[in-house]
Amino acid sequence: MLKNIVLELTGFSLEVNAEIQGGVTAIFGPSGAGKTSLLDLVAGLRRAKSAFIRLDDRVLTDTEQGICVPARHRGIGYVPQDLALFPHMSVRRNLLYGCRRNASENRQFRFDHIVQVLEIQPLMERGIAQLSGGEKQRVALARALLTSPRLLLLDEPLASLDAKLKARVLPYLTRIRDEFRVPMLYVTHDRSEALTIADAIVVLVNGKVAQQGGIQEVFSRPANLDVAGLLRVETIQPGRVAQIQDGLVRVAVGSTTVVAPEQNLSARARDVFVCIRAEDVILVKGDDRPSSPRNHLAGTVRSIGRDGPFMRVEIDCGFLLTASLTKQACEELALSPGDRVIALVKAPNVHLIPR
Amino acid sequence: MIRPEEWQLVWFTSWVSALSTLVILPFGLGIAWLLARYEWRGKSVVETLISLPLVMPPVATGLILLKLFGRRGPIGGFLHDTLNLDVVFTWRGVLIALGVMSFPLLVRSARVAFEEVNPRLEQIARTMGANDVRVFFTVTAPLAMRGILAGMVLAFARALGEFGATIMVAGNIPGQTSTLSLSIFQAVQLGRDADAFRLLGISVCLAFAAVWTSELLMRRRKRLV
């Protein structure tokens, strides 16, 4: 639990109030948002003007009471962005550095087990300079886990790796999440990373918590335009509420109308932004037959581009809508620019943000 | 070829220089670490005080030490009265003169070495449960070892050649406080050029050995890091 945190940083101050449950919580924000400073504060490596930090039922920092548990007694594992592996020690000595004597009682964090899960055995006698980027990452993770932490702080663990390596290291992170069940604070500015690994998310914008909640919840219902932009919700279009009836809102967007449930419209606003995630858009070719999604938007394919394993299709259907399809789906539909398609979007997937 | 009293001279100069380096080592590293890692009040004053012996005439530094450690001086008087220890004109005087003169060199290189150690490594070591002492000996010092060794060699070399402060505090008592440099000076003064040249040769060998050893040590460190 993080409460009343005021961190004075150069140029601005970071204010955070967040109750964080177990599992993986992504701390999401643009670079320079003070994410690393926040982790440092939680780890006890930095002091804040005001802060209250509690882990389970132990108060770690309370500036009002003058409590500040030293970093070495916090039981928090920290993998910083530069990993901070000790260059003068072998992998084995790095791993053993923080190994608690009581670790053998805690079967979860046994040395052999961690080494096996992260596949470090063959690296054991090497020096840090002889490791590749992905190997270093795994050693740093193992070293933090070997301290039997009650909370793991990961600072952009994949940011320094290229796409190929990212894909190789990410499964280890999910393995750690599922195998060791350590709560994690995971700092990132990469949405796909956050979506893959995190259960919850705290979005920082301009030094404040702009939104927090379950990861799906936040991604499909960004609280405001800043959050939507930061999370790169693909379609964000201005619209105007035309009608509210039977719990449904009709919103005029461009030259067409979309339907959303009334609870998606906060604060009875008239001018809104319509947000639709690309993966919530279904494309159909041919006749517009009746189907369950409320929004049937006829349009033409404007462009098709690759986006990792997916294809990103832009459709002009009175406004510009982005859809995300698998490559296979794209091939089966034989989509090419200029084709007429129908875009289907279920009403609950249309999110409205007041303008 | 080399006379016994010259051997004694070499032996005395080497061990008193080595001892002075060892004596100042813990203080030097401590202060260097404080200077490198923390901001505190009076830091600049301490920095300046430590560097003074580098820029002041050694004889002037020697005079200050003579006044401080003399039997009627504040520190010397105390040592004489309570421990019955005399400093001035004894080997202890030589030790103190050498230590004070070489201290800034040790502190300077150790400080630069500490500053080059990534503080992140120390912080992360702390999150892994290490206290400050363990962090220093397992992370900071090993990573700064090249700079520390270089500082020790510099300090030792400075001590080997020290003249001005030593002659003020310890005089030049043959067999007791005479060092190589003092003896070379004396030999030249007395017109015994052959003696002076022999002593000169010895100092060259000694300096060579010191620098060579340190190079070897550092090469071994480099392979490790």
Image: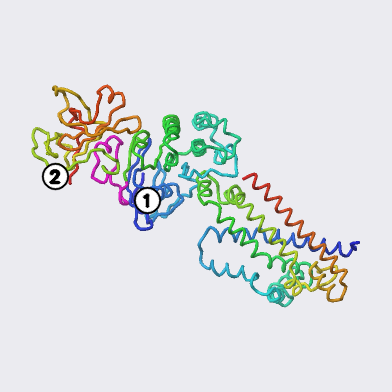
Residue at numbered disc 2:
A269
How has the structure been colored for display?
rainbow
Q: Is residue B121 above or below residue A197?
A: below
Residue at numbered disc 1:
A32
Task: Name which quarter of the figure residue A352 lies in.
Answer: top left
Chain ID for label 2?
A: A
Type of amino acid under label 2: Ala
Q: Which residues fall within the magenta stretch? A: A204-227
Relative image position of residue B111 (x, y in whole percent): 59, 59
Q: Is residue A205 magenta?
A: yes
- Is the residue marked by circle 2 packed among few (<14), some (14-19), or many (20+) residues within 10 Å? few
Q: Find the distance from the CA under tag 1 to the CA under tag 2.
A: 32 Å
Q: Residue at x 35, y 51 (%)?
A: A5
Q: Is residue A304 above or below residue B180?
A: above
Type of amino acid under label 1: Gly
- Looking at the rendered structure, the secondary structure element under dot 1 is loop
Left or right, residue B132 beside residue A173: right
Relative image position of residue A199 (x, y in whole percent): 34, 35
- Looking at the rendered structure, the secondary structure element under dot 2 is loop
Q: Is residue B47 above or below residue A178?
A: below
- Is the residue marked by circle 1 packed among few (<14), some (14-19), or many (20+) residues within 10 Å? few
